[in-house]
Image (spheres, rainbow, N blue to C red):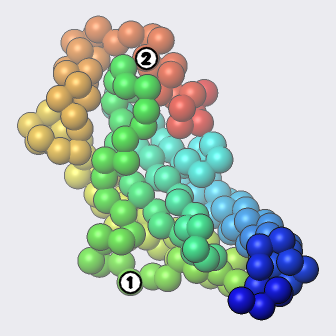
Amino acid sequence: MDDNTQPGSAAAVCFSSEYQAAKVIERSNAAKVLRRFAKLLESRGYSRRSTWFARERDHLIFFLHVHKFTFGPSFRLHAGVRVLNDPSENVCLNGICTDTALRFKGHLEYDTTDASWDNCALQMERYVVEVAEPWFNQMNVKTLLAAEQPLTIIGRESLRLALNGESHLSRVLFSRRSLGLA
């Protein structure tokens, strides 16, 4: 084995430093895409908390989660629904995502240019308009109570309690805080 390929060698350290610098730039550019995406979603009533975008309706929070892939400059978008009164401490990615949306053929990738950041944000918005929001519109209270998915048994029971006026304020506040609505 060549000395330059050994861990700790000058070449390995240089590669590692270059790789880390490239990843810092990639994360910075991802943040630029997310800021553009947030501006596009503001007019649709979404609030942002980090990589979560959410809005509230009828005892429910409809949310989007943006996942930045570690292997390159690209994203996956998840859409989901949470009952405000849900006692769960974690937000479940219980809905649809860009990987499985047959109607969506966008590319959520970017490079180092303003144009690519704008295009990626626009493609993300397109997914919201064409796929996520129609799915959200199908997720009304009646449908959610009748279906086994996307809500868990606990989620459905939490929704029943909320509809009967038995919401727990601490659960509602936790759900709102978790998704950036409080």
Taking the spot 38% from the left edge, 83% from the top edge, the residue there is 105
Is 177 drawn above or below residue 128 in the view shown? above
Q: Secondary structure at mark 2?
A: helix
129, 11: nearer the viewer: 11
Judged from this view, the residue extending furthest toward the front is 1
The amino acid pointed to by label 1 is Lys
- Is 103 left or right of 31, judged from the image as shown? left
Q: Is residue 155 visible?
A: yes
Indicate the position of residue 123 as horizontal and vertical percent values.
Answer: 52, 77
The residue identified by callout 1 is: 105
Q: Quadrant of the N terminus?
A: bottom right
Outermost residue to the right:
10
Residue 50: x and y, percent?
Answer: 65, 47
Query: Which residue: 17% across, 44% down?
Result: 149
Is residue 46 visible from the viewing direction of this image? no
Q: Are marks 1 and 2 in contact (CB under 8 Å)?
A: no
| Residue at image location 53% in from the left, 60% down from the top | 67
* Circle 1 SS class: loop
The crowd level at tag 2 (other Cα within 10 Å; few <14, some 14-19, many 20+) is: some
Residue that mark 2 sits on: 171
Q: Determine crowd level at label 1: few under 14, some 14-19, many 20+ residues with C-alpha closer than 10 A.
A: few
Disc with the residue nearer the chain's start (1 vs 2): 1
Q: Residue furthest left?
A: 146
Q: Nearer the viewer, residue 125 or 1?
A: 1
Residue 61 rendering spot, x and y as whole percentages: 41, 37
In this image, 141 relative to 28: left or right? left
Q: How many marks?
A: 2
Q: Residue at x 53, y 37 (%)?
A: 179
